[in-house]
Amino acid sequence: MVRVTGCRLPPAPEDTGFRLAVIMKTITDDDIDRVALDLDSTLAATSLTAFELLGTPEYTYDDIESWSWGLNKFGKERYLNAMWHAWTIRPTDVPVMEAGLPETVSEMRDHATVDVVTAHPENEAISNGKKQWLDHIGIGYNDFVPVTSGKAELGYDAYVDDKPALPGEVAEKNPEATSFVIDHQYNQNIEAPHVRVGGVSNTI
């Protein structure tokens, strides 16, 4: 298992699917059988569609300075409504975070069970929108697992996610697992063991 605090793998070039590929390199080399693959801001650039719904399409991921930035900038209810409405109103308009995701996830599934484990309120329309997006993009998966709270206790061997608090939760509740952190401005300075990757393709 990879147990490195703050290890940074090479950055992802533009439009190459390189993020997942580096994760795949680690997954194929290590004893990883079950992977929890996040969706929002890992596979799908949900915030970009949310910014459009908020009337601020000029914002990008480079503007998100912290995990709570959107809540503080727009207000919690307004910002989260835009995030979830991206899935209920415009699911097929949500961009991908990187190119080559269908091929990379397919390769990942050649070596491990890959479940899409995604957090959102209990809402069938949101789940349906996310599954519609996965089908639209052509990303295969073993199971779709919506959660309303923690992921660490689900017992996966590896987690691929952008949430800065998740490595700490994994270290506490599932210490043998590997946490891959998708590199964003808002998830720097994580102290718990993790492997920082430029994108999903960096995990293969």
Image (tube, grey):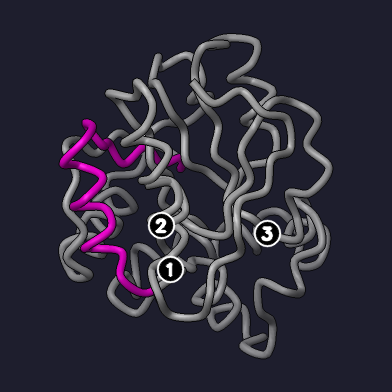
Does label 3 or label 1 sit earlier along the sequence? 1
Name the residue type under label 1: Ala
Mark 3 to mark 1: distance in Å? 20 Å
Does label 2 or label 1 sit earlier along the sequence? 1
**Left or right: residue 62 compared with residue 39:** right
| Residue 201: numbered disc | 2
> Which of the pair 167/77 is nearer the observer?
167
Mark 2 to mark 3: distance in Å? 15 Å
Residue 26: quarter of image: top left
In the displayed structure, 17 sits above or below 52; it is above
Q: Residues within 10 Å of mark 1 (few under 14, many from 20)?
A: many
Q: Is residue 105 magenta?
A: yes
Residue at the disc numbered 3: 184
Assess whether mark 1 and mark 2 are in contact (beta carbons under 8 angstroms).
Answer: no
Name the residue type under label 2: Ser
**Left or right: residue 139 compared with residue 85:** left
Residue 131: quarter of image: bottom left
> Which of the pair 166/46 is nearer the observer?
166
Give the x, y percent position of residue 157: 40, 21
Residue at the disc numbered 1: 86
Q: Nearer the viewer, mark 2 or mark 1?
A: 2
Span highlighted in magenta in the image: 99-120
Q: Tell me the residue at 61%/64% (across/down).
A: 11
Q: Nearer the viewer, mark 3 or mark 1?
A: 3
| Label 2 residue SS | strand
| Label 3 residue SS | loop
